[in-house]
Every structure is written in C-alpha cells, then in structure tokens.
Image: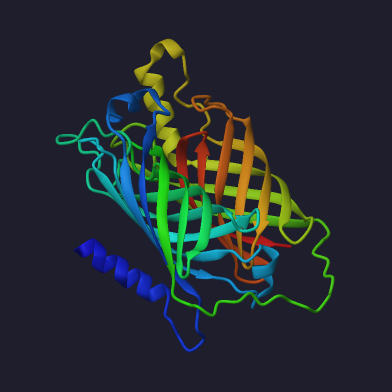
C-alpha cells in the first residue's frame, strides 16, 4: 500500500488535468523475460524468469511547441515499475521515474527511453544476503529502453502495445558490491486516452531556421562519491574535469570531441590493496591513481533537455585493472544558453564506476 500511495503522490505532482485540456493517457503493461549474466559472479543469482508490471501516465504532445513537431510529436510522462526477479537473493525492485516515447513508421513503432530511481527489497548484506553482488545499496538508478508496436486507438479510447523492454539497475558503485543487473522482457499492455478531442497542431507557417553553429568550447566539472570494488573499503569523493569542443550540425545533433582528467580517490586505496593482496603482480603500491581520457560524443538536442552519450579511451592509465575503454550516458539541462547541469553514469561496458553530477559552461 505504501508503494501505491507513493506512486499516486508522485504522479499527482507531475500531472494535473487543468483548463487547458491536457491530452493525458494511462498505460498498463505486464512484463516477463530473462536476466542477463554479464559477469561470472552473476550466474548463481539468475535462477528464474523475472516478471513485472509497469504503469505509466503520459502526456501526448500536440505541436504547441517547436520541439513537438521536430520529434514527430513524442509522449513524455512518469512511470512506476515493479519487477520480481524470481530469485531469493535478488528479491524485487520498485522504481519511479520519467520517460520519453518517440515514434516512427506512421507512429506504429515506438522507442521508449526512461530514467528513474529504483529500490530493492533485498540488498546485499554480509550476514543475511551475502550472495547478492548485484545490489550493494537499497536505492539505485534505473534505466529503461523499450521497442514496441503501438496502436493508441485500437478501439475508441483504448489502445494496445507489444514489444520488448530492456531494464538496467545499478548504484553506479556508490557502494560495493555493484554488479548491477540487466533484463530483457516481453512487454504487452493496454492504454486509455482521456481526451477525445486530441488533435495535432501542425505549423502551417513555412520558415527555415538554421541550427548550425560554429565550434563551441565547453568545460565541465563532475563529482560524486563511490567505493572501490572491495566491499566496505569506504566511500570516497571523485572529481572528473573535462574540456571539449562541440559542433552543432542541425536541429537534433551535436558532435563532441574532448579530453578529461579523472581524480578518483577510491582508486588510490584500491591500488594499495591490490599491490598487497597480489604480490605476484609486482605492482608498486604508489602507482599513480590518476587517469586521462579522450572521448567522442553525441548530444541529442530535444528542448532545454538533451541526451548525451560518449565513448572514451584512457591515454594515461598507470593502473590497468579496468579496460582502457569507457562510456558515459546521461541527461543535460541547459539553465541558460551557456550554463548546463547534468546527471550521467560512467561505466566500463556493463560495469558502472560512477554516478556523476555535473555543471558546465559552454563558451
């Protein structure tokens, strides 16, 4: 009951049907699938087929703003996700968050992108649940990607959708252990549209606006806390300082090229531990913990919110425990044309290293 009350309160704060006759819809989806064993120590946790339920409240865009038409009238809203892993060590997860739905192929093919906060019923505990190496904390990040066939008006106000949903849970190694978990699930559901008068407002004024820009320069500072892979080694702050150039190509795409310095304090203690625990590796305990990377990136410009993805390579990495390739995904919000804030997750393939909170300046 407390989860239902939280959901209703959250959704109520996000949406209110007002005098503007906002086109709201509700979706309910049932889920069933499989978890992915992306590390060797995950196999013993995956002994059942995860299932779940997703409830979404969404607003359909109608062309009242420029970005509605630019992105083929997407939906945006809030979701509640329940997922039972059918595994005693993993338990169940409850998540809330926000999402966008983008449409293709005459609005029959839907891409869903969601980000939120998840809570597990059964996190790692040294005495009572030492097998759960996936969730080192009770709260963590939740990321979802979905591909659906969607018919919003199958019968009057009732629609149908079916497809596949990918879910990811990770605390970004805020605390160890943190293998995280990925699942792929069959997604089947129905939706109900509250507004019978929903109509798209097409801009009939012909005008051409160029979004191309000269090369711009950015400096960004990202920080947070994390822990080394050694459980209970202690949380430490990290500081990631980046400088990059970007080039906006058109309405939707901006390309990036840059470099960054990683000052991850937990890495310093991990190097000392590794040198003592594995003397056969002949590692100097005073090995420099700092790293320098170069990266390329892409920014999908929506409105003041953008979706960011980067792929990098360490050109300076004295301690080579991690692979030299890293990636980062997240969201940015432009407070002004020059100042932005962001939330990103930095990983080495499927293994998260840091949840980053950033602020930057674009020259």
Residue found farthest to the front? 155
Foreground residue, 241 or 304? 304
Residue drawn at 70 percent across, 65 percent down: 70
Residue 172 is at least partly visible in this image: no
Q: How many labels does the image show?
A: 0
Query: For residue 32, what is the image quadrant?
Result: top left
Q: x, y (%) of residue 193?
A: 45, 71
In the rendered view, does 118 fall on the left or right side of 317? left
Q: x, y (%) of residue 341?
A: 56, 62
Residue drawn at 60 percent across, 77 percent down: 199
In the rendered view, does 59 fall on the left or right side of 207? left
Residue 154, above or below 188? below
Query: For residue 359, what is the image quadrant?
Result: bottom right
**Quadrant housing the C terminus:** bottom right
Q: x, y (%) of residue 332?
A: 58, 59
Residue found farthest to the left? 128
Foreground residue, 262 or 304? 304
Residue 220 is at least partly visible in this image: yes
Foreground residue, 263 or 144? 144
Q: Which colour scheme is used?
A: rainbow
Q: x, y (%) of residue 357?
A: 49, 56
Foreground residue, 167 or 31? 31
Residue found farthest to the bottom? 19
Residue 23, above or below 321? below
Residue 90, above or below 219? above
Residue 248, above or below 322? below
**Quadrant housing the N terminus:** bottom left
Residue drawn at 28 percent across, 30 percent down: 45
């Amino acid at each position: 009951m407390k989860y239902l009350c939280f959901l209703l309160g959250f959704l109520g704060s996000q949406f209110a049907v007002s005098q503007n006759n906002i086109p709201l819809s509700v979706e309910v989806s049932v889920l069933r699938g499989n978890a992915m064993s992306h590390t060797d120590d995950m196999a013993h946790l995956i002994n059942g087929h995860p299932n779940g339920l997703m409830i979404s409240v969404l607003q359909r865009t109608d062309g009242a703003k420029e970005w509605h038409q630019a992105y083929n009238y997407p939906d945006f809203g809030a979701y509640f996700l329940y997922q039972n892993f059918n595994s005693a060590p993993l338990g169940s997860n409850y998540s809330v968050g926000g999402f966008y739905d983008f449409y293709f192929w005459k609005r029959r093919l839907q891409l869903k992108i969601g980000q939120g906060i998840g809570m597990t019923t059964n996190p790692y505990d040294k005495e009572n649940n030492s097998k759960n190496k996936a969730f080192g904390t009770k709260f963590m990040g939740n990321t979802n990607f979905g591909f659906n066939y969607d018919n919003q008006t199958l019968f009057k106000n009732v629609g149908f959708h079916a497809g596949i949903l990918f879910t990811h849970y990770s605390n970004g190694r805020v605390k160890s252990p943190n293998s995280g978990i990925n699942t792929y699930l069959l997604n089947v559901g129905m939706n109900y549209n509250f507004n019978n008068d929903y109509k798209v407002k097409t801009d009939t004024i012909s005008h051409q606006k160029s979004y191309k820009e000269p090369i711009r320069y950015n400096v960004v500072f990202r920080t947070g806390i994390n822990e080394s892979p050694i459980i209970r080694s202690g949380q430490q702050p990290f500081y990631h300082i980046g400088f990059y150039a970007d080039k906006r190509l058109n309405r939707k795409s901006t390309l990036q090229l840059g470099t960054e310095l990683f000052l991850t304090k937990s890495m310093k203690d991990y190097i000392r531990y590794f040198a003592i625990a594995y003397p056969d590796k002949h590692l100097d305990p005073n090995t420099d913990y700092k790293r320098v990377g170069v990266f390329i990136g892409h920014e999908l410009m929506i409105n003041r919110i953008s979706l960011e993805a980067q792929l990098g390579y360490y050109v300076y990495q004295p301690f080579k425990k991690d692979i030299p390739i890293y990636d980062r995904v997240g969201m940015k919000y432009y407070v002004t044309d020059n100042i932005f804030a962001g939330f990103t997750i930095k990983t080495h393939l499927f293994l998260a290293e840091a949840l980053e909170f950033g602020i930057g300046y674009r020259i």
